[in-house]
Image: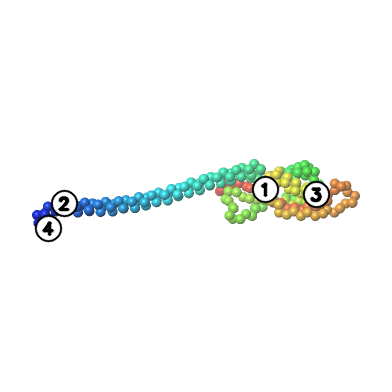
Amino acid sequence: MKFTPKDLKRLRLPGAGLLVLSAVAIACYFAATNYMQESKAQSAAAASQRVEIQGRLARATEEEREIKENLQQYQALAARGIVGEEQRLDWVDTITAIKNDLRLFDIAYDLEPQHPFDLPDSVRTGNVDFVFSRLKLEMKLLHEGDLLNFIDGLTQRGRAYVLTRSCNVSRAARDTSATSLAPRLQATCVFDLITIHHHKPA
């Protein structure tokens, strides 16, 4: 089929329209592609932000749980008298009460003045001081159970955290004239009585 100049003139307008439509189609394609890329980027950013917010919420929830647990532990320590100033006279009464309740033999002891308790730097805080008084005692025992019961009483009744440093048990010198209730063992023990001093920062 041959096109005459007259036919070409007739095709100018449709051809121009086709070119315009092609240009518009190409522009729409690139615009749609760019929009999809921007949408994907925004979606990825929103997902990343959502993950970050969820992580922060999880950390905040965990920190809140830890704070509640620490507060409960602190309150329990305060209720036992471990938080606050040391009451040295209370220790005298406590040891005497344990001795009488358990019907133990004589107990000789020495309670040293308080000293700072050596803690690793990782557990130090600025608002509390850990201090201890060293308790050295010698006691005569009928059997090993007396010592265990005494330590248990010291731990449960004392207004401090009791850390046993050492305990040596040996046979006591036997008195042939003594009755069957005479002490058979001699114990020498060292305890650290740890208390917490809470103070406001300067």
Label 3 or label 4, whichever comes before in sequence order: 4
Cα distance between the residues tagged 3 and 2:
117 Å
Q: Do the residues under discs 3 and 4 have CB atoms within 8 angstroms? A: no
Cα distance between the residues tagged 3 and 4:
128 Å
Dot 4 amino acid type: Lys
Q: Secondary structure at mark 4?
A: loop
> Which mark's residue is nearer the viewer, 3 or 1?
3
Q: Secondary structure at mark 1?
A: strand
Dot 3 amino acid type: His
Q: Residue at x 75, y 46 (%)?
A: 149
For the question of whether residue 198 can be seen, the reply is yes
Dot 1 amino acid type: Tyr
Q: Position of 2 compared to 125: left or right?
A: left
Mark 3 residue crowding within 10 angstroms, few (<14) / some (14–19) / many (20+)? some
Q: Which residue is mark 1?
A: 161
Cα distance between the residues tagged 1 and 2:
98 Å
Mark 2 residue crowding within 10 angstroms, few (<14) / some (14–19) / many (20+)? few
Q: Which residue is mark 3?
A: 143
Quadrant placement of the N terminus: bottom left
Q: Secondary structure at mark 2?
A: helix
Q: Position of 188 compared to 123: left or right?
A: right
Mark 1 residue crowding within 10 angstroms, few (<14) / some (14–19) / many (20+)? many
Q: Nearer the viewer, residue 18 or 108?
A: 18
Q: Which residue is mark 2?
A: 14
Q: Secondary structure at mark 3?
A: loop
Label 1 or label 2, whichever comes before in sequence order: 2
Give percent across and percent down for residue 144. Answer: 78, 50
Dot 2 amino acid type: Pro
Q: Which residue is mark 4?
A: 2
Label 3 or label 2, whichever comes before in sequence order: 2
